[in-house]
């Protein structure tokens, strides 16, 4: 009979210990989420207050991994271009707009489906980036003009952009 009591006592202690481990793991998970949230908030503040490029690149990585909220990258990208003149962000404005209006999926073909005002804004930032030496914007514009996606097909502009892109690739 004593053996049964001992076994029951050991079993009870084991169950209690396992329950505490589950509670501890849940607490650790919540603490981890809170810490990540605080880190993300600090990164966002560095972008907003200082135009910190390293922090902006961390945000890009974060939003690429979390595509269901990548539309938030649009706000930070516009800020980086307009306030801090970081024209590399122009290509992320284009990507974010397409993603936002195409249910989180980037597809250049969707550019054609954008309403005229959104398309105008998107083209503004693509052209701004291209004029300021953003090769990603130059490549995107070249593709859109070559294929006539959302724009009138224009081989002259497409070919001139190809030349610029090829020259940059030769320099690498």
Image (tube, rainbow, N blue to C red):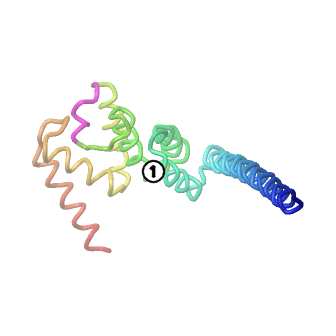
Q: Which residues are magenta?
A: 109-115
Q: Horizontal and vertical percent for residue 59?
A: 54, 51
Q: Horizontal and vertical percent for residue 74?
A: 47, 39
Work out which residue is located at the far front of the displayed protein and give it: 1
Which residue is at a point 11% across and 49% down the rendered structure image? 156
Give the overall secondary structure of the magenta segment: helix
Which residue is at a point 78% across and 56% down the rendered structure image? 11
Q: Which residue is mark 1?
A: 64
Which residue is at a point 83% across and 56% down the rendered structure image? 13
Left or right relative to 142: residue 98: right
Left or right relative to 82: residue 11: right
Left or right relative to 154: residue 62: right
**Which quadrant: the C terminus?**
bottom left
Image height check: is 48 above or below 166? above
Q: Secondary structure at mark 1?
A: helix
Q: Horizontal and vertical percent for residue 25?
A: 71, 53
Task: Answer few, some or many: residues within 10 Å of disc 1's Cα (few below 14, many 20 plus, some between 14 and 19).
Answer: few
- Taking depth in this image into account, of 99 and 156 the one nearest to the observer is 99
């Amino acid at each position: 009979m004593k053996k049964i009591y001992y076994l029951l006592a050991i079993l009870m202690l084991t169950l209690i210990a396992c329950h505490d481990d589950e509670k501890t793991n849940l607490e650790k998970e919540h603490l981890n989420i809170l810490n990540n949230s605080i880190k993300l908030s600090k990164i966002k503040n560095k972008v907003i207050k200082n135009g910190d490029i390293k922090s902006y690149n961390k945000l890009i990585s974060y939003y690429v991994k979390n595509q269901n909220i990548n539309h938030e990258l649009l706000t930070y990208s516009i800020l980086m271009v307009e306030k801090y003149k970081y024209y590399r962000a122009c290509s992320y404005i284009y990507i974010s707009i397409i993603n936002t209006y195409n249910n989180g999926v980037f597809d250049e073909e969707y550019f054609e489906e954008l309403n005229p005002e959104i398309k105008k804004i998107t083209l503004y930032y693509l052209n701004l980036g291209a004029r300021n030496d953003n090769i990603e914007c130059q490549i995107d514009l070249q593709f859109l003009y070559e294929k006539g996606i959302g724009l009138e097909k224009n081989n002259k502009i497409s070919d001139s952009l190809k030349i610029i892109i090829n020259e940059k690739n030769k320099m690498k």
